[in-house]
Amino acid sequence: MKITWNHERTDFPAHLSLEQKIEIFFQQTWGWQLRVADLIANGGEPIGGGPELEKVEHSGFAVLQICLSYFETIGQCVALGGSEACFKAGVRAVFPSLASADVEFVDSLLHQLYVDARCGLYHSSRTRRGVGLGQPPEGASMAFDAARRVLVISPERLPKALIRHLEAYRTQLSDSSNVAARAAFERWFDQEAG
């Protein structure tokens, strides 16, 4: 049975070490979610090699559907709480620059991203008012106009930003001095892997 895009369950012992759990999480999230979203949005070399793939036209909302769950997953690894609290904690973890932004602006952004993007896609198969696709300035993956309540997300850039975060998170978890982060991750992994 496949447990990542490139591992069988038999590739690992019955009782996994923390390092093996980190690697499984990374390979699952990269190979089955974020890299797939990136290939859909941007094309490129397929996982495992082969001829170059073309990007899939008009796939932006499908890419968001794939990507937005990453925030909640990361939030569950770093915080306790329900779906909304974990989602918002995940966004803050992925984009730490939000910590230095205006609190009201960040709260409005997180609300719109959760309610109108994430919940709209998951519960209604479309985003709700004020959320659209586009290319924010300065290479950003998202831009939010709080006054107009408009959130623009780049489906081409978001997977790349999330992959960068995943790689950095893997490095953080691999550092044995990050005791609290490693313990929180392992607690989440063990609960989810059941």
Image (tube, helix red, strand yellow):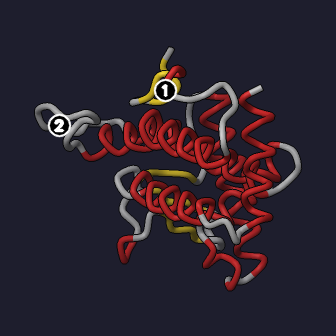
Q: Position of residue 184 (x, y in %)?
A: 79, 54
Q: Is residue 74 left or right of residue 28?
A: right
For label 2, the crowd category at 10 Å Cα-Cα, with few meaning under 14, some 14 to 19 and many 20 or more, is some
Q: Is residue 56 above or below residue 108?
A: above
- Work out which residue is located at the far left of the displayed protein and give it: 51
Q: Is residue 63 above or below residue 98?
A: above
Identify residue for label 1: 11
Q: Amino acid at mark 1?
A: Asp
Q: Could you tell me which residue is drawn at 52 percent across and 41 percent down? A: 29
What numbered label is drawn on residue 64?
none
What numbered label is drawn on residue 54?
2
Residue 51 sits in quarter: top left
Q: Amino acid at mark 2?
A: Glu
Going from N to C along the chain, the mark reached first, 1 or 2, is 1
Q: Is residue 80 above or below residue 47?
A: below
Q: Is residue 102 left or right of residue 65?
A: right
Q: Position of residue 112 (x, y in %)?
A: 68, 56
Q: Position of residue 40 (x, y in %)?
A: 32, 37
For label 1, the crowd category at 10 Å Cα-Cα, with few meaning under 14, some 14 to 19 and many 20 or more, is few
Counting labels gives 2
Residue 30 sits in quarter: top left
In the rendered image, which quarter contains the C terminus? top right
Task: Give the CA distance from mark 1 to mark 2.
Answer: 32 Å
Q: Is residue 61 above or below residue 148?
A: above
Q: Could you tell me which residue is drawn at 39 percent across and 30 percent down? A: 6
Can residue 138 be seen? yes
Q: Secondary structure at mark 1?
A: helix
Q: Secondary structure at mark 2?
A: loop
Q: Nearer the viewer, residue 19 or 114?
A: 19
